[in-house]
Each structure stands twice: as C-alpha cells, then as structure tokens.
Amino acid sequence: MTGDGRADIVGFGDAGVWVALNNGNGTFQAPQLTVANFAYVAGGWRVERHPRFLADLTGDRRADIIGFGNAGVWESLNGGNGTNFAAPQLVVQNFGYDAGGWRVEKHPRIVAGRR
C-alpha cells in the first residue's frame, strides 16, 4: 500500500476499507479505517455482486482500490502513505451489477496491468 515492497493487510468490513501496514519485521500496525465505502454497511457492497480489488492504477507503485458496484466501476486512489485515499469516484458506467447487468457467477472482471 505504501510502495515499500512489503505486503500489507487490507480488509473490506462493515464500515469501510481497513488497512494494517507492515512494520517490516513480521508484525503489523493497528488497522486503520481508510475509506468509509466499498463495505457491507458503508456503501452496500456485497461479495456476491460487487468484486473489489487492489491495483496500482496510476503507476506510482502503490495499490489503489477499484470496485465493480451497481452503477459501474468505482476507484479510490491511494494518497501515498497507504492510509489516506481519495473519495471513491465512478470512472466507468458499465461493468456493474445494474450498469451492464454483470454477474459474478457469469461475468468475470479482472484488473490487469503491465510491468
């Protein structure tokens, strides 16, 4: 999440997206709520309808959040330190549960990049 090459822990909970940054010695910092969306309660996101991924969307070596919601594709860009993210924005009005009729069990959606 920070571009330091160490794996961090990310969870999509009820209140939003939580991040626990890697300390580099096998331990992690306490989880922090980073985005109050993309979640079961905060945003109404459901596993069976709304895939969510982490991917570097800007080429800065930091994972951003991308989700396939009802209205289409949403993104929340990483502010740089792994715990401050921009407010989610609708970036494509397709590939969504309602916008396009995409279904998890029928229509895989993948985020792909090139290194």
Image: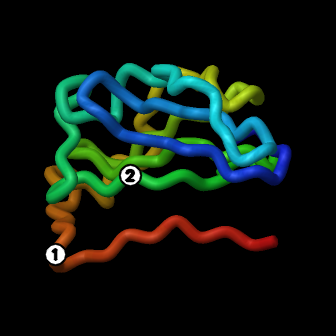
- Above or below: residue 6 compared with residue 100: above
- Above or below: residue 77 compared with residue 8: above
Q: Secondary structure at mark 2?
A: strand
- Above or below: residue 103 compared with residue 3: below
Q: Residues within 10 Å of mark 2 (few under 14, many from 20)?
A: many
Relative placement, left or right, of 5 versus 21 is right
Quadrant occupied by the N terminus: top right
Colour approach in the figure: rainbow
Q: Secondary structure at mark 1?
A: loop
- Report which residue position mark 1 lands on: 105
Say if mark 1 contacts mark 2, CB within 8 Å.
Answer: no
- Report which residue position mark 2 lands on: 52
Residue 62: horizontal and vertical position, in percent? 73, 44
Residue 83: horizontal and vertical position, in percent? 62, 24
Relative placement, left or right, of 18 versus 42 is right
Query: Looking at numbered disc 1 in the image, what kind of residue is underneath it?
Result: Glu
Query: Looking at numbered disc 2 in the image, what kind of residue is underneath it?
Result: Arg
Image quadrant where residue 112 sits: bottom right
Residue 37: horizontal and vertical position, in percent? 35, 27
